Amino acid sequence: MAKHITLDELNAWTFEQRQAFYRSGLTRFDNAEAVRLVEMMVASGLPYRPGKEIAHGDREMKALEAIIYSPYNEKMLLEAAASGKPPLGALEPLIVETLRDDYRVDNGGTIAAGYLIARRLYALGFEKSSSQKMPDGSVARTAATFRKKRA
């Protein structure tokens, strides 16, 4: 995702190319530019996903956003990041409680949660670090850790 993609290029792509790009963007949230490109695709209004996967605008995505962007939960995100643990591990119990069976690996729920957490932490001045195994009993198998950017 290093190449700079324009809206004109997105318009010329097939549905399958946009679908692959969107999926790749959600799973490879390496930096703020990758997040920006996914946001550009969503804002374009172009079709980019099959109906069974969680995506921007869906009820499940809105619930994830509410949990991840809640000022009440920000402290948990920051504490997990500061301790070198995946912030998803701190919020996943709330996500599972809210979405129940709608938070799954097969519908992209875990990927969407990781993407939104990355977007939130990039905005707070963090950068992605390594991935770690999630605690036993978690829905997600692994999740990214984050560290504060050095000045």
Image (tube, rainbow, N blue to C red):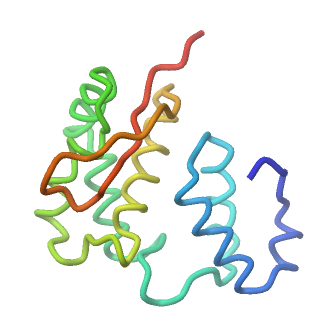
Q: Is residue 116 left or right of residue 28?
A: left
Q: Position of residue 20 (x, y in %)?
A: 66, 74
Q: Is residue 48 above or below residue 5?
A: below
Q: Position of residue 129 (x, y in %)?
A: 48, 31
Q: Is residue 72 above or below residue 92?
A: above
The mark tally for this picture is 0
Q: Residue at x 42, y 62 (%)?
A: 112
* Most distant residue in the bottom direction: 51
Q: Is residue 60 above or below residue 28?
A: below
Q: Residue at x 48, y 70 (%)?
A: 56
Q: Is residue 18 left or right of residue 80?
A: right
Q: Is residue 94 above or below residue 51?
A: above
Q: Position of residue 46 (x, y in %)?
A: 69, 80
Quadrant containing the C terminus is top right
Q: Quadrant of residue 137?
A: bottom left
Q: Residue at x 87, y 69 (%)?
A: 9
Q: Quadrant of residue 18?
A: bottom right
Q: Position of residue 127 (x, y in %)?
A: 52, 30
Near-viewer residue (41 or 128): 128
Q: Is residue 140 left or right of residue 130?
A: left
Q: Residue at x 62, y 68 (%)?
A: 22
Q: Quadrant of residue 71?
A: top left
* Most distant residue in the top direction: 151
